[in-house]
Image (tube, rainbow, N blue to C red):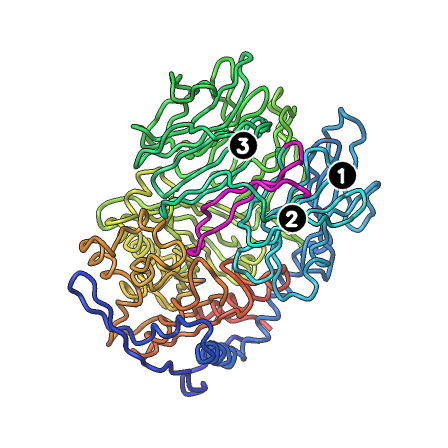
Amino acid sequence: MTATAQTPQDSPAPPVAERRPRERTHHGDTVVDAYEWLRAKDDPGVIAHLEAENAYTEARTAHLAPLRERIFEEIKGRTLETDLSVPTRRGSWWYYARTEEGRQYAIHCRAPLASPEDWTPPALTPGTPVPGEQVLLDGNVEAEGNDFFSLGSFEVSDDGALLLYGVDVEGDERYTVRVRDLATGETLPDEIPGTFAGATFSPDARFIVYTTVDDAWRPDTVWLHELGTPVAEDARIFSEPDERYWVGAGFTHSRRFLMVELGSSVTSEEWLLDADDLRGAPRVVWPRRDGVEYSSEHAVVDGEDVLYVLHNDGALDFELVRVAAADPAGARATVIPHEPGRRLLGVSTFRDWAVAGYRRDGLERLAMLDYSTEALDEIPFDEPLYSVGLSGNPEWAPPVLRLGYGSFVTPGTVYDYVVATGEMLLRKRQPVLGGYVAADYAQERVWATAADGTQVPVSLVWKRSFGTPGSEGPRPLHLYGYGSYEHSIDPGFSVARLSLLDRGVVFAVAHVRGGGEMGRQWYEDGKLLHKRNTFTDFVDAARHLVAAGYTSPDRMVAEGGSAGGLLMGAVANLAPELFAGILAGVPFVDALTTILDPSLPLTVIEWDEWGDPLHDADVYAYMKSYSPYENVREGVTYPRILAVTSLNDTRVLYVEPAKWVARLREVGADALLKCEMVAGHGGVSGRYNSWKERAFELAWLLEVLGVADPA
């Protein structure tokens, strides 16, 4: 089968959204918006339009159904469908999840330790019963009767007796928390609707601490629920009226304190409560100061309760200090000094040592921190590109440290790092069926020069049998980008991506400014009134790949999601000639409209990232100059565009891509919209559904790239 393009003459007529012009005026500037009416989610006409868009997209891509099915089967065929995670020790149990062939969701289980000295996780065999296994929660059972299912909270009490879990069946990220007695299987009367993710038990399992959101979907209040009492009697622990701040809460790793955390994009604040006095008054760690971010972890050093505080007060890339937990505003002892170019990301404390995470030269690093000497000992890895992080370390005093590791060519790997010896024990590597050989693939990082001279890293991965990119003529290339919120796109393995690589496609990531790959300044240079750097970096990276012979504009497709979808919309306007196609997932393409309206979810919080166009004329003008919807132009030949969204997304509302596609069609662009009618920001739920969704996108992408699928 060969993927052949449909021309507009072969296609049904696209839906035409009715124009209902509305005016809005800010700072003396009047904008006429013909498609704002699509925001009325409860309007049957809006739903009918979205369904018409879905029908049109299905008709336009119907010829790709065999390719979609082939890619889905490839993903499925490379995945060990009946599998188990590496067990994690907590208390007297090993906890793990397993999947079963043909079932959408994970089954969460535990099995008893062999002895208190047992630190070697049992080697579990897929399909073989686990001695002493207890099923805690079967997601397939819980999801029955629902088109969507997501767990937002999942925790077993410290004594192992109770299970807390929060379920969302709409995709709107509001979870109903329930409690199960693990001895009897009985569901307790305690049921808490409308919570945010991350509810947790108190150490004594007497209480549940949870968070709720305001009308703008901002987590703003932390509550205390005593088991066995009516939810109406729950006590408010903390509430934050300032709309710029998110609120969350969790217990320190030591279980000594409850930490209430507040954060905007640029400022944070924490409050402590003794875990054995949760009805007491919280006390602030450091009072908030605009532009100062910090986070703290509790430890006991030489018999004293201390806090290790990571902060950026006069330290752009952050430093780590130690303070007394009883007097956190008192004397600070510097533990890891600020070092430009080494972006400290966090510290995780344990009883006898801590682990520091940081980013240097665009890669994540981990180092052991000795409490007595406060020396750092970095954990080495061999690959030039990789990702690493802590993974499931609930115990306070373990002899080993659980790590998650991977790269573009190395499947996800679980190690236990023996702290005393430095030995790295391989516990599991993600199985990839079908004869996957990592050595058949290559990865490297190249550097593109931006218009202002900045060197922008670009990561590449390809299959060696097709030759080295740039050596044998232009190759089909899939270029991915994000570039916001200091979020980094790190090297990671993807089973689905193999369906591209094995067809000769090169995958690339442009690590543009606005992300965090190269430190805090990299982020600062891609936000607020520097946001355009994000877009021009991506364009310059694409131009570099063309100039270096890796690809050509007719053989390159760009992809980004959420804020990366804003990037996609912006580059479509800036350099449409550079791309054959653009895939935009849940794209933030009507940014100015959203950020102007403080009643919309998350808008006020977002002002620290994008600026406040409602009250600042300069920010308004700057955002208007790049917001994709406002800058769709007549007389431009746009690349083919596929926008994917979800009706119940609370982060980037479906209306943004719906309006964008309608406007693109006005100027003759070949734009498709696919709207999941029961899903949220993360798309559909269930692994098979997710594979089918990705197969749909990859089939479209391959067709645009002109990659023929062999018979």
In the rendered image, residue 77, in percent from the top left (x then y), is placed at: 67, 60
Instruction: Determine the residue located farthest toward the left in the rendered image.
Output: 28
State how many labels appear. 3
- Lateral position of residue 108 relative to residue 243, left or right: right
Separation of residues labelled 2 and 1 (CA atoms)? 27 Å
Q: Quadrant of residue 406?
A: top right
On residue 123, the disc is 1
On residue 656, the disc is none
Q: Amino acid at mark 2?
A: Tyr
Q: Secondary structure at mark 1?
A: loop
Q: Which residues are magenta?
A: 203-228
Q: Which residue is mark 3?
A: 258
Residue located 54% across and 69% down the image: 696
Task: Identify the image quadrant of the N terminus.
Answer: bottom right
Q: Nearer the viewer, residue 496 or 627?
A: 627
Q: Nearer the viewer, residue 439 or 86?
A: 86
Q: Nearer the viewer, residue 64 or 207?
A: 207
Q: Nearer the viewer, mark 2 or mark 1?
A: 2
Q: Amino acid at mark 1?
A: Ala
- Lateral position of residue 569 relative to residue 167, left or right: left
Separation of residues labelled 3 and 2 (CA atoms)? 19 Å
